[in-house]
Amino acid sequence: MEQAAHGRSLFSDALRRLRSNKAALASIGVLGFIVVAAVVGPWLSPHNYFTQDYGAIWIAPTLADAHWLGTDGLGRDLFVRALEGGRISLMIGFVATLVSLIIGVAYGATAGYAGGRVDGVMMRIVDILYAMPFLFFVILLMVFFGRNILLIFVAIGAINWLDMARIVRGQTLALKQQPFIEAARMSGAPAVSIIARHIVPNLLGVVAVYITLTIPQVILFESFLSFLGLGVAEPATSWGALIKDGADEMGRAPWLLIVPAVFLAATLFCFNFIGDGLRDALDPKDR
Amino acid sequence: MLLDVRDLKVSFDTPDGVVEAVRGLDLRLAAGESVGIVGESGSGKSQSVLALMGLLADNARVSGSATLQTDTGALELIGAKRRVLERIRGARIAMIFQDPMTTLNPHLRIATQIKEVITRHRGLRGRAATKAAIEMLEAVKIPDPARRIRYYPHQFSGGMRQRVMIAMALACEPDILIADEPTTALDVTVQADILDLMAELRQRTNVALLLITHDLGVVAGQCERLLVMRHGEVVERGAIDPIFEAPAHAYTRDLLAAVPKLETPHFARASS
Ligand SMILES: Nc1ncnc2c1ncn2[C@@H]1O[C@H](COP(=O)(O)OP(=O)(O)OP(=O)(O)O)[C@@H](O)[C@H]1O
Ligand SMILES: [Mg+2]
């Protein structure tokens, strides 16, 4: 905020525009609430996500009981499990996105800036990796080595950075033609510092929008794996795993499906609205 | 001779064949001297100076020689190693461009951008670099430089941005300033201010100037000698006055005819 008094960056202008977008602002609020709840919620509850209580199975949501979102067939508290699942789902979403972001930006910016043959080789490698049936590999690996969160990160990261690299490379090719890059080269800046100081900061807008698309995509992908029974292993859980458990007991205990589904849907909605808001706010038309 | 360019040729490989952009340029520039290059669009002016800086497109082929006089003797620029050129660019030879709206990075403060050059070539950091940057903004007559240095480019007007570009170009006290149509994108009144500023700074710093323009009026006010290029070749060269009085080449006559009030171009400039 200290900078606002002296100079306004294009990015802080964009943030100001974002702040006037009601849907995006509300989404940031809701998402922030979900994240905080997922992180601190489980500690505040008297229950934990793994203790089974056979005296309290299939309890429906009620305000009269300590299990106010009910329990599952093993008597585990759904409120805590939903938040615990959120921890895992969100963590996978953020970490895998961060990994694919770092690799994708570095790779894409290098390829785009180098251009010519280097670019050709680097992007052919991306094409080849694209053609790999990673999902198939992951399923195979999990069948052999058992379920493992690390494996999920690696699998998702391995697929997602490819998109990031392509987008960043395209942007870099366009940016490279900008006179200020030419001016920087003209002032003796070496390639590394041009990429780090002049290219990457100008990718911020695209990257920000892309992050809001990737995180929900990753969360959804993890849910999909969990739904296939390939996600995190019991008793740990994720929203996808909870939804799968809930779907199995849909008739007897619909809350087991509804609660995690609402959390997941709300989170995905929020990311979409934030993404839309960011895209509008960063639209170069307004510059 | 500070800069000695001999038989510089630049051609581009394109899918439609070879484009010969520069066909044998000879140019000598003494310390503190100021030479204008004029010529129609596409005559090879920009590619000539880009060749000197080693910044041509990937499909370019260069031949000829360009030697720059340095403290350690004559240095051949054509075909020099990237590292060598990076030490020359911005430090010994600096450049300003046509469109000041797009030659500054929109996401970085002016301070960051000027300090980057100062740190790279003069080795100054932190406070010392900031102080040097503010001094440069002062030199190009930007009011309240200590505050404005924290601005981002879009907070400046076009003329101000060109002043910032000039400040950056001169920050490392280069021997040669190349100005590629430095005022074309600016308002007429702002053009005059920028030209006056350049003339003043040139006197103060004794930097040699290579001024590329379409405007013979500008050349008359700024330069001692003139090179007229057409289709990649120099068709006429010499001191300003003789060329203005009796152009030898028909093309130069056409160019002169296009300058309004050409009878008194450089007296008008000098007296303003
Ligand atoms: N990368 C390239 N590939 C092919 N041809 C090129 C390339 N770059 C420049 N040219 C050609 O080189 C010629 C000279 O271009 P140059 O930029 O030097 O013109 P100029 O005299 O600066 O013109 P202007 O006054 O419009 O700036 C032009 O015909 C242009 O089309
Ligand atoms: Mg040009």
Image (spheres, coloured by chain):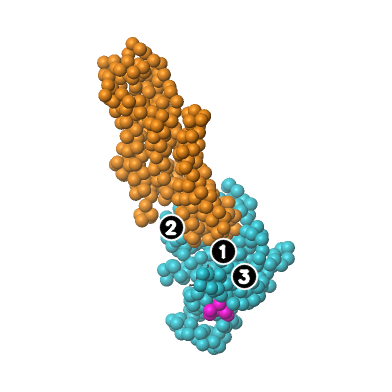
Amino acid type of the residue that numbered disc 3 sits on in the rendered structure:
Val
Query: B267 and A271: which one is in front?
Result: A271
Q: CA distance from mark 2 to mark 1?
A: 34 Å
Colour chain B is painted in:
cyan
Please give the residue where the numbered disc 3 appears in the rendered image. Answer: B62
Image quarter hosting the C terminus of chain A: bottom left
Q: In the rendered picture of this protein, how many numbered marks are placed on residues?
A: 3
Bounds of the magenta span?
Answer: B229-234
Query: Dot 1 corresponds to which residue?
Result: B58
Note the chain letter of the orange one: A
Instruction: State the SS at label 1.
Output: loop
Tell me which chain the residue with mark 3 is part of: B
Which residue is tagged 2?
Answer: B156
Q: Residues within 10 Å of mark 2 (few under 14, many from 20)?
A: some
Element carrying mark 2:
loop
List x then y, in percent, for residue A184.
Answer: 54, 58
